[in-house]
Structures are given as C-alpha cells and as structure tokens.
Image (spheres, rainbow, N blue to C red):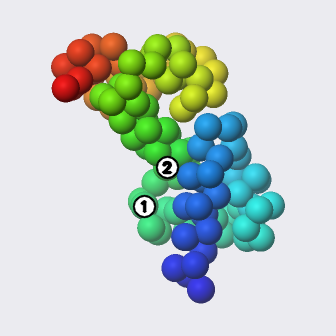
Amino acid sequence: SKTNNIGNIEVFINRNINKKITLKDVSKNIFLSEKQISRIIEKEYGCTFSELLTEKRLAIAEVLLKTTDMKISDIASQTFYGTESYFYTVFKNKYGVSPLKYRNITKK
C-alpha cells in the first residue's frame, strides 16, 4: 500500500541517517525502484530524495545544537557524515546563521 511504502522509506532513512545513503540503497532495501521511491517522496513531501535527506539531517543537527554540548565537528560528522564545510553551508542556507551562532542564540 502507498502508506506502507512511505512508512518503509521513512524508517529506512531514519535508521541510516548517520550514514551516506543513496536512492539505490533505499531501493535495494524496500524493494521499490528508484523511480517509484522518487515519485513517492515527491508526492508526499514535495521534494527530492536528497532534499528530504538534508531536511532530516538538519533537523537532527538542530536538536543536537540546542540540547547538547557536542562539538560542531562531531555534529557535522554525525549528521552529514563528513565535511564540516558542507554542513556549515547547508545549515547557514536554512537557518541564516552558522551552527555555532545558532547554538548561542537557542541554547537554554
């Protein structure tokens, strides 16, 4: 069923969010073609697979910045599995400030 497919896609992404995952990985694991998965994501979320992945990663990074004292580099490697500069760029594009500044503004 359609609902089941989106659920399976969500679960796979959420379980593997801290790894480098591709559409092919999702496809192999939930037994739908890459085209089908792209179509489902587009319909449900109005975005591409990589945009969905980025959104989810940013949401996790945001929580970690607000609620932990983890180093920015550790948050970057946990959420974007790698380059800190890419994490900075993507984060700043979405939130308008650097991760560190965001933490300083929002930390309780």
* Residue at the spot 40% in from the left edge and 30% down from the top edge: 64
Taking the image as shown, residue 102 lies to the left or right of residue 27, namely: left
Tell me the quadrant of the picture where the C terminus can be found. Answer: top left
Assess whether mark 2 and mark 1 are in contact (beta carbons under 8 angstroms). Answer: yes
Q: Is disc 1 surrounded by few (<14), some (14 to 19) or many (20+) residues within 10 Å?
A: few
Res. 106 image quadrant: top left
Give coordinates of residue 68: x percent, y percent.
Answer: 38, 25
Q: Quadrant of the N terminus?
A: bottom right
Viewer can see residue 39: no
Residue depicted at 59% across the width and 61% down the height: 11
How would you rate the neighbour count of disc 2 (Cα within 10 Å): few for under 14, some for 14-19, many for 20 or more?
some
Q: Which residue is mark 1?
A: 45
Q: Which structural element holds mark 2?
A: helix
Query: Which residue is drawn at the image coordinates 44% and 26% (left, top)?
Result: 90
Q: Which mark is residue 52?
A: 2
Q: Nearer the viewer, residue 51 or 4?
A: 4
- Placement of 61 over or under 26, stated as above or below: above
Q: Position of residue 19 (x, y in %)?
A: 67, 38
Q: Inspect the image, locate mark 1, and give the three-letter code of the amino acid beneath it.
A: Tyr
Residue 52 left/right relative to 78: left
Q: Amino acid at mark 2?
A: Leu
* Residue at screen point 52% across, 14% down: 73
- Seen as rendered, the residue at the extreme right is 28
